[in-house]
Structure formats: structure tokens, C-alpha cells
Image (cartoon, helix red, strand yellow):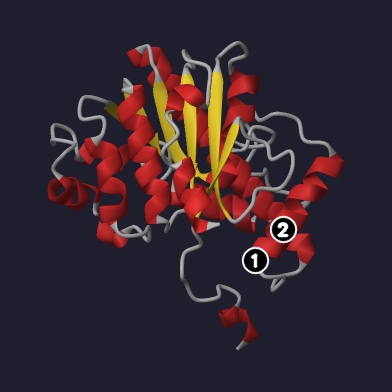
Amino acid sequence: MIRAALALLLIPMSALSQEGADIVVLGEVHDSAEAHARQAELVAEIVPAALVFEMLTADQVAAAEGIDLTDADALAAAFAWADSGWPDFALYSPIFAAAPEAALYGGSAPRDLVTAVATHPPGAANASPMRGYDLPPLSGADRAVLMDEQFEAHCRAMPREMMGRMVDAQRLRDWWMADAALLALEETGGPVVVIAGTGHARADFGVPAVIAHLAPGTSVWTLGQVEGAAPPGAPFDSVEAVPPVDRPNPCAAFAE
């Protein structure tokens, strides 16, 4: 199984997708070295005009202006990466180095806005923080599916009714990355690569869906990277398996 998964890492981009996509969304398992190595490999093949990172805000990108993208230490310091909560920068630095001439764009929504969305009481009299964001319509059935996924992702430790807020926060992040990608495409001419978690890379509800809603006709190609076998009909143009990361059970803390 692991050998088969690693063999997928050798497949060139040209064998996986149609050439000429305006925006390529490369999903990841955040703490997987193999997933990041794959992203770096594909970025080197694509030679993007711009890179959009889920992990970076516009302010962090501005702080790194003029820094050589191959200088990992200088980038990490400028981004204040050690305080960001993301995995070690050593996992991400090869992606920057793979496109040293690319323009950087921050795809992270402001933390206070995400918090406001995630904590906004349903039906509250005050306006929802989501108001004003042009997101694709979401049916009640689709919303229920996403709530179930969030319920499982949160180890069933919170009431399912609260998962609607988590869905909203996820969709806000999707919008923010899509908006940054479209700005990058407008300013650089593309191609643009978006680096994000695989959940954001899904074509049915994630960043690609928001791009299709905001800018119909923009060509998008998306890669999902998953641990283990991908479910049938996974919503990506291509899905690749990476070896499972040896990590503590994230649900163990809720059981204590």
C-alpha cells in the first residue's frame, strides 16, 4: 500500500491534468511531508506566476516582500511562522523554493472574522458576519452533509447543531482563498497555484466551487491528497494517497 502510494508521487503533472488551467488547487494533509513534497514537485512543473497560501494572511505576505523565496529562514522569520500554529516551516519551504519568481498572495481570512463567524448564534438579531460574501448557494441537503462531516471531524464532541457555524467558517475560508486566487490571476495573468488543505481543494464545495461562482469560465484543476484510499467519486480532478502520518489520536483529548 505504501509503495503504491509513493509511486503516485512520480506521476508528472502533464499525466494528471489538462494543460492550461488558470488556477491549480493543490490539496494537502497539513502535517504530511510526502504531501508537501508532491506539492513542491508540481509547483516546479507548473512554474506559476503566483502562489496563494491558505496559511498566510496578506499582512504576512507584505512582511516578506523582497525576501528571496529560497531563503527559508528569512521567510519563516518574516511570516512569524513559529507563532502561526501551522506545522514546521521545513515542510513548506520547498514549495516556496520551487517557484522563486512567483508572486505571493495571502489566502487566510482574518482570524477575528473567522472567530466571529464560528461563534455567531444562529438566528441572532445582529447581522451575520457572513453577510456580504458572495458564496455559491448551498441546499439544505448539502449543508446537512457538510455538518455531518464537521461533526465527525470534531470527534462528535460538540453538539451537531453547532456544526452549522463550522460549515460557515469553512466556507468563509474558501471564499477568501478563491478571492485571493482570482486577484492573483488578474494581476499576474497566471497560472496561479493555491496551496490548501484537501478539504478546501474539493471541487463540489471548496475553493474551486467558489471560483466557478465568482468567475465562471475560469479554468480550475484540483488535486486531493488523502491518507488511505480515496472514496469513490471523490470531488477532485485527481486524488493521490500519501502514507498515514504517525500522530496522536486527535479525539483522545475529548475523551479525557
The residue at the point 76 percent across, 69 percent down is 159
Q: In which quadrant of the rendered view does residue 60 lie?
A: top left
SS assignment at label 1: loop
| Quadrant in the picture for the N terminus | bottom right
- Looking at the rendering, in which quadrant would you find the C terminus? bottom right
Residue type beneath disc 1: His
Q: Residue furthest right?
A: 141
Residue at the disc numbered 2: 163
Left or right: 29 in relation to 137: left
**In-front residue for pair 136/222:** 222
| Residue at the farthest bottom position | 256
Of the residues tagged 1 and 2, which is closer to the observer?
A: 1
Q: Residue at 36% x, 59% y: name it.
A: 87
The reply to whether dot 1 and dot 2 touch (C-beta < 8 Å) is yes
Q: Amino acid at mark 2?
A: Met
Choose top left, top right, bottom left or bottom right for residue 11: top left
In the displayed structure, would residue 244 be above or below residue 15? below
Element on which disc 2 rests: helix
| Left or right: 123 as drawn, with respect to 126 | right
Query: Percent position (x, y) of residue 224?
Result: 56, 41
Residue 154's tag is 1
**Residue 29 image point, x, y percent:** 48, 52
**Residue 170 screen position, x and y as percent:** 60, 47
Label annotation for residue 244: none
Q: Report whether 96 appears left or right of 167.
A: left
Q: Residue at x 49, y 76 (%)?
A: 248
- Image vertical order of residue 233 relative to residue 4, above or below: above
Quadrant assignment, res 151: bottom right
